[in-house]
Every structure is written in C-alpha cells, then in structure tokens.
Image (cartoon, helix red, strand yellow):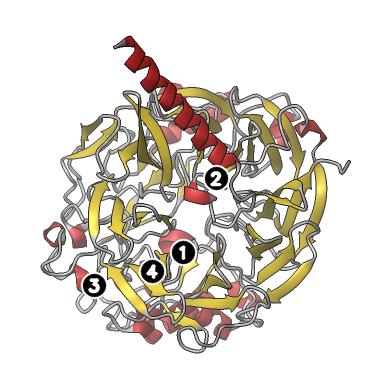
C-alpha cells in the first residue's frame, strides 16, 4: 500500500514537472492577446530577479497619434519576429519586434480626429483581425492590406444579424476576438444606457466573414433564461455583452466569456428579473455556441458590478488531483474558481441579503452570491473609521459629505440621496485582468480602492441632453475629466458635423448613440453649440419612447476630498498574489503613489491603476498601470518585493507583452496615459537586458 501511494505521488510530481517543462519549452512569442489561455504568463527566463536591475530601454516606437485625452490600452501581440499593435487613433501597426522599426501601418479612417479605446488585435495564420467602430476588419499580416474576400470588401458590419435595424444600433468590440479552428469568436461593446444594443456573442468564418453562430445573451422566446426578463426585452433591451473579450480552450472545444451589465446600469425598472445572461460567466460550445454552463455573479445588477475581465484558464490541485479550472476576478474583490468542464465551484459560494430598493419601480434580487474563499482582495463597504486623515481639514470635509449619503455595504440600493459604491465602478479588479503562474499557482491582480457616489435623479422629459448625456457629462456639461471630458465650449473645438458624427459613432470610452435618431442627435448638437435646450421631439418623450426610464444617474462621481485625493484612508491601490490551491492571499503590497504627496513624505499610498500584470517563469511580475507616477515595475513573484522600476513617457495603462526576438528577451508596454487628467502618450517602449 505504501509503495502504491509513493508511486502515485511520484507520478503526480513527474507530471507536474513535465507540464512546467512543456510551458517553458513553448513558443517564446506572445501571439495571443492576454497570452495563452489568457493567463498573461511567459515561459521565458533570461530576465530574472538576479539581473532585472540592469533592464534598460531597447527601443521606442512613437505613433505620433496621441492628443489631449487620448489613451492607448493595447496589449501587443508578437509572432515570427513582428509585433502588432493599435495606436490611440486606431491605426494598426506592424513593428520589427527587435528594433521597433515600423514595417507597415493601416489606417481605417485617415480623417478621424478622435481617439478610440482598443485593446489589441487577433492573429490567425496569414490574417490579422481588428475592430474599428462597428466593423470587423481582416488584414494581410505581411502587408497590412485589406483582405477583400473577407465580408463586404474586407470588413463585416457588426450591427448586422442582431434582429434590429442596423442604422439604429451601436456595436463595436474594444477587446479582440479569439480563434477556434476557422472561427473568430468575439463579444462586443454596446451602450450602457438606453436605447441599447444586444450583446450577442458571435462566431464568424475567418475566411469569408460569414456568421457561423450567435449566442443571445438576452434570450429569445423559448431559450433558456427568457423568463428572467420582461417578455419583450429581447427586442428593445441592451447590454449583457462580453466587452472584456472571450477565451478559447481548443482541447475542450469550449469558449468562455464574462458578460457586462444590462442597460441601463443603475436603474432597472424596464428589466425586472435576474436578467440572464448579464453579469455571467458563460461556457459555450466553441463550434455551435450552445450553452454548456453559466454562473451569474450579480442578479439584476444596479451597481455596475459587471465582470471586468475575461476569465483565466488555469490548472489547480484538489485532493492531489490536477483540475482544469477557470478563475474569474471581479470588481467586488472576489475571485471565483470553477471546474472548467462542468462549472462546479472549487471554493464555496454563499449569499448575502440585499435591502429592498426605496426607488419607485425598482425591484432588486433578495440576495447576491459571494465567494467565501479566497478572501476579497479589496475592502468592501465604507464606514467613518475608514475615511481619510490626510489632513484635519480633509477629514472634516469628507466626514460632512459622508454623513449626507447612504453607506450600507456593498449591495446597498442606489438612492436619490446618494449611495456609496465601494469598491467603486472601476473596481476592485478591472479590465487589465489577472496573471496566473502555473509554477506557484498564484493569481496576480492589481486593484483600485476608490469609493464612488451613485445618485439617482428624475429624468427631464423635454431635454435630450439631460436624458441621454448628463449621466456621464453632468448637467453643467463639465464632465469628469480623465473619465468623461468636459463639453463646455465644445462647439468652439469641433464643427457641428464633427459633434454629430461623434454622437453617432462614439469616441474614447463612449459608444455611439445612433439609436437616438437624427432628430434627438440634432437637439443635443444644437444644445452643445448654442446652450439652448430643445422642447423635446416626440421620440424623446416618455409617452412614445419604449426605453423611457423615470430615473438616470447624476454622473460618475468619485468620492474625493476637497484637494482631489481619495476620500478614504490608504491604500488607494494594491497588487495582490492569491494562492488558488489554498484560497489564501499570499501577499499584498500598496501599488502606485502620487508624486507630489511622496515628495512630502506620504509614500506608498497606492493609486488608481489601469492595465494588468504579466508573470514569468524567470520569477518576475511586470506591471505598469499606475496613473500618477507613470512607473513600470518588476516584482519578485514569490514575495512581492519591488526589484526594479522606471518612469514611462506616459502612464502604461495597458498590459505588457513578453517575447523573445533573435535570442533576446523583451518586455514591451504601450504608454498611452490620458486617464485621471494625466498627460496622454502614443508610444510603445520595449525593455531588455544590455547585449552581451
């Protein structure tokens, strides 16, 4: 018996060693957005804790596409010595991965002046796929020329095939698709307000662009989940979209996605019910799109607590047995871990009661699921003892504000007086995603610790701007610069035609709003130029608009002190390593700081951070992400010790790529900045050890 146990353990150990050896022998490219299995892991070992201090800039590519407020969130992909990326204005570029020399560039719209958020491209053999506005393009990888045999003269209109008039919808894709055999499978980016567009997950033929299958995330009659929505929701509701991308397991022939909220985010009187498949982890048959299993993280979401990143496909050990698993980070700070094949939770999941909504017409779910293990990687819920003490004046001002709003925990309902949302709308975990190390079984996730204030206000039936724009750009048009730009005097910066086009097509993080119709868009444009509001077209009014809601939010309001710093006590951002075998947080460190506060001795506060980590077999975690100090960091993956950092030309709000070219290891990151009022950039910087 003892001999058998010893033999079994020896075989398990050898299997583990073989698996790690296979990973390390893998292709040293970075051919997929997020790395293989979306775990943001590199098998390369040249750069290590012993020599990372010698890391230096190997090359810099300047796109010259940056301008005030632009961003660059692309995770480059690298194959066969070529790095492919997108610029702030959404040109696609191919660069020599060893030198940064531009090989080719493709511009889908040379006349566009606005930036577009985009997180990268997809490679499939000799083709490259990317999305611009409502179109999925196919390019020749070698030349950058459009593949005219794909779709309609080289592109597919993503608004087609959704069962609604294409010219009244906005559908794009911020995150690139994933390849399974001869399919490109992708989610979408759609408006978070109403009128909305459906968030179907779809598969297109990589050769022809023909739609091969579609999964309705807002179920149609007769489909599973249809009874969790009002009967006509599939015709008029929007959202439930896999905006953060999808991940393919080719061996299991499955595709995994995490979906966003149903529209409107903060008030759901038009969508009473649990709203499947909004806020879900979805496992689909990659060939047919049929549902295999799902898990809904939030029922009838009114807090914008959608899943912020696509799942990580990982391997964990349970009772001495290796299990193909899926890890999902959340804005709330939970990490869910499931058996990838069956959807069985690998850590216990409980529930938390939700207070009833005090707002007319709203009906919340009685409880919400919560992960009981691992512990949350951010604080959940705000009390007075957690408010800032940066200065006595700041504390007093924040305390006064805090006592005027509700703060009843993570699932306290939105109110007209104001409700603290903590973790905030941007998390907790966010779109940069997590990295997973197969060797240590640690999941690395950076997190924001920022409270926001959500306040519902009655809609103004006769004002197109107030009904459709004020939630983001505020009633006074001043916006939230860094998140939503000011529209004061926008008529002096843009022509009327440019304003109309931006409303129709979108820009930055704003999707297009073609569904509003020409009359309403004209009203909004006139108001922005003249300051005179409309008296309301028939399509705007409550009596004729099926999407009419009684309430809107009064904007995306961070809870800040009078000097503009977070209203809570630090840390304001963290980097975490979570053991997914044991369900424990292995280490946690403050992440980011404000240079002006650090100069006064207030260091290691943490800060807002956007963009994700990568982890290497060489023993390192690389991450940019921090908004204000513009740093690029390397941490010891086992201890969390900071080993190296440098200042980037603009904040690296993107996920790095690690690859090998001509036998040399490189770490490349897009430096786009543009968030939280910080300077914008348009460069890609690659680092390497000095050549011998």
Residue annotated with mark 2: 40
Q: Is label 4 in a helix, a strand or a loop?
A: helix
Q: CA distance from mark 1 to mark 4?
A: 30 Å
Label drawn at residue 177: 1
The mark nearer the N terminus, 4 or 3, is: 3
Q: CA distance from mark 1 to mark 2?
A: 16 Å
The first of marks 3 and 2 along the sequence is 2
- Mark 1 / mark 2, whichever is N-terminal: 2
Q: Position of residue 502 (x, y in %)?
A: 52, 76
Identify residue for label 3. 236
Per the image, label 2 sits on a secondary structure element best described as loop
Of 144 and 306, nearer the camera is 144
Observer-side mark, 1 or 3, equals: 1
Which residue is rendered at x = 25% and y = 47% of the image? 296
Classify 10 Å Cα crowding around label 2: few (below 14), some (14-19), many (20 and above): many
CB contact under 8 Å: marks 4 and 2? no
Query: Judging from the image, what secondary structure is the residue with disc 1 in?
Result: loop
Residue 527: tell me if it is visible: no
Q: Alpha-carbon distance for marks 3 and 2?
A: 37 Å
- Nearer mark to the viewer, of 4 and 2: 2
* Mark drawn on residue 98: none
Q: Position of residue 594 (x, y in %)?
A: 67, 36
| Disc marking residue 468 | 4
Residue at 35 percent of width and 61 percent of height? 241
User: Is residue 4 depicted above or below 687 in this figure?
Assistant: above
Quadrant of image for the C terminus: top right
> How far from the left and from the top, in percent, is residue 292?
23, 54
Residue 343, quarter of picture: top left
Cα separation, mark 4 vs mark 2, equals: 38 Å
Q: Are marks 1 and 3 in contact (CB under 8 Å)?
A: no
Nearest the eye: 233 or 132: 132
């Amino acid at each position: 018996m003892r001999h058998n146990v010893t033999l079994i353990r020896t075989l398990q150990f050898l299997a583990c060693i073989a698996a790690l050896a296979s990973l390390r022998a893998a292709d040293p490219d970075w051919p997929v957005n997020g790395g293989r299995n979306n775990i943001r892991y590199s098998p390369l070992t040249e750069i290590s804790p012993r020599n990372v201090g010698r890391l230096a800039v190997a090359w810099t590519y300047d796109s010259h596409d940056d301008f005030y407020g632009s961003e660059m969130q692309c995770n480059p992909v690298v194959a066969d010595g070529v790095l492919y990326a997108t610029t702030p204005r959404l040109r696609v570029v191919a660069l020599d991965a060893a030198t940064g020399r531009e090989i080719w560039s493709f511009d889908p719209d040379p006349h566009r002046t606005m930036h577009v958020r985009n997180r990268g491209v997809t490679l499939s053999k000799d083709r490259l796929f990317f999305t611009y506005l409502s179109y999925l393009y196919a390019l020749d990888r070698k030349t950058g020329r459009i593949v005219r045999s794909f779709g309609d003269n080289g592109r597919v209109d993503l608004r087609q095939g959704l069962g609604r008039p294409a010219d009244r919808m906005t559908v794009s894709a911020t995150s690139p698709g994933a390849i399974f055999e001869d399919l490109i499978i992708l989610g979408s980016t759609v408006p978070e307000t109403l009128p909305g567009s459906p968030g179907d997950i779809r598969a297109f033929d990589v050769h022809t662009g023909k739609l091969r299958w579609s999964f309705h995330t807002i179920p149609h009659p007769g489909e599973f989940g249809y009874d969790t929505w009002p009967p006509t929701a599939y015709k008029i509701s929007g959202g439930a979209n896999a905006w953060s991308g999808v991940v393919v397991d080719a061996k299991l022939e499955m595709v995994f996605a995490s979906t966003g909220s149903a529209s409107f985010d903060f008030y759901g009187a038009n969508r009473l019910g649990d709203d499947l498949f909004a806020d879900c982890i979805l496992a689909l048959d990659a060939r047919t799109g049929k549902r295999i299993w799902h898990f809904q993280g939030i029922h009838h979401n009114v807090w914008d607590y959608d899943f912020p990143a696509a799942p990580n496909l990982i391997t964990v050990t349970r009772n001495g047995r290796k299990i193909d698993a899926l890890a999902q980070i959340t804005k709330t700070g939970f990490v869910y871990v499931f058996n990838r094949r069956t959807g069985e939770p690998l850590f216990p999941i409980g529930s938390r009661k939700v207070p009833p909504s005090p707002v007319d017409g709203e009906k919340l779910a009685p409880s919400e699921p919560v992960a009981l293990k691992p512990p949350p990687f951010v604080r959940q819920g705000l009390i007075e003892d957690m408010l800032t003490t940066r200065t006595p004046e700041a504390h007093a001002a924040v305390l006064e504000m805090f006592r005027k709003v509700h703060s009843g925990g993570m699932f306290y309902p939105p109110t007209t007086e104001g409700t603290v949302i903590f973790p905030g709308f941007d998390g907790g975990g966010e779109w940069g995603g997590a990295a997973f190390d197969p060797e240590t079984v640690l999941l690395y996730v950076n997190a924001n610790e920022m409270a926001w204030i959500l306040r519902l206000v009655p809609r103004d039936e006769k004002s197109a701007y107030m009904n459709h724009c004020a939630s983001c750009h505020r009633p006074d048009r001043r916006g939230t610069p860094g998140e939503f730009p000011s529209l004061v005097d926008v008529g002096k910066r843009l022509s009327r035609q440019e304003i109309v086009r931006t409303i129709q097509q979108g820009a930055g993080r704003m999707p297009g709003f073609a569904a509003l119709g020409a009359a309403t868009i004209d009203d909004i444009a006139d108001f922005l130029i003249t300051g005179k509001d409309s008296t309301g077209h028939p399509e705007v009014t409550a009596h004729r608009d099926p999407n009419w809601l009684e309430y809107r939010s009064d904007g995306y309001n961070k809870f800040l002190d009078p000097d503009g710093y977070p209203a809570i006590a630090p840390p304001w951002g963290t980097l975490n390593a979570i053991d997914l075998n044991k369900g424990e947080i292995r280490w946690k460190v403050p992440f980011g700081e404000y240079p002006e506060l650090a100069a006064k001795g207030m260091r290691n506060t943490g800060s807002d951070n956007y963009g994700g980590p990568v982890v290497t077999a060489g023993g390192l975690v690389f991450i940019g992400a921090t908004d204000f100090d513009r740093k690029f960091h390397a941490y010891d993956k086992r201890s969390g010790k900071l080993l190296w950092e440098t200042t980037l030309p603009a904040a690296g709000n993107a996920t790095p790529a690690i690859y090998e070219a001509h036998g040399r290891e490189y770490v490349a990151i897009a430096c786009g900045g543009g968030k939280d009022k910080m300077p914008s950039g348009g460069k890609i910087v690659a680092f390497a050890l000095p050549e011998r």
